[in-house]
Amino acid sequence: MPPLSLTADEATVLLLGAGVMEKSFDAEYSTVATGAARKIAGALTNSQREKVQQLQQSIWFTAQSMDSQAEIEQLQLTLTGLFISTTQF
């Protein structure tokens, strides 16, 4: 494959996805995901690798899909540390 140029965020997402593949699929895909993750992580700075490790320790993936845009937006807000509370009277 030709060389790729990724942003730190793109690399982070790929590493998170590789972690899911390592744990959720058969040995062949797990091995491939592990190898790809090593290559991507090797190209990151130490601080970027630490960010990925923090995310890997704090995010759990499930097979349940999100049914609405509101659920997706709430998850995004939660993951970025922005919590919105509304109260109706």
Image (cartoon, rainbow, N blue to C red):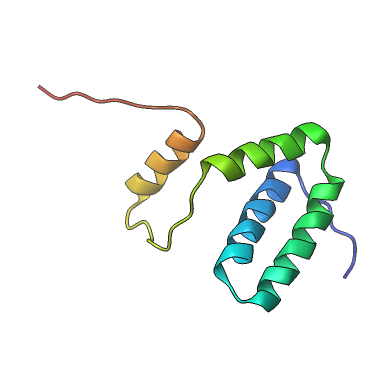
Reply above or below: 35 against 47: below
Question: Which corner quadrant holds the C terminus?
Answer: top left
| Residue 11 coordinates in the image, percent (x, y) | 73, 49
Question: Which corner quadrant holds the N terminus?
Answer: bottom right
| Residue 12 coordinates in the image, percent (x, y) | 68, 46
| Residue 66 coordinates in the image, percent (x, y) | 36, 56
| Residue 33 coordinates in the image, percent (x, y) | 71, 65
User: Which residue is painted at 39% across and 27% down in the image?
Assistant: 83
User: Which residue occupies the extreme left position in the image?
Assistant: 89
Q: Is residue 28 left or right of residue 87?
A: right
Name which quarter of the figure residue 49 lies in.
Answer: top right
User: Which residue is painted at 68% across and 35% down in the image?
Assistant: 51
Q: Is residue 89 left or right of residue 2?
A: left
User: Which residue is painted at 55% across and 67% down in the image?
Assistant: 24
Reply above or below: 34 against 45: below
The one nearer the camera, 37 or 82, is: 37
Q: Is residue 80 left or right of residue 88?
A: right
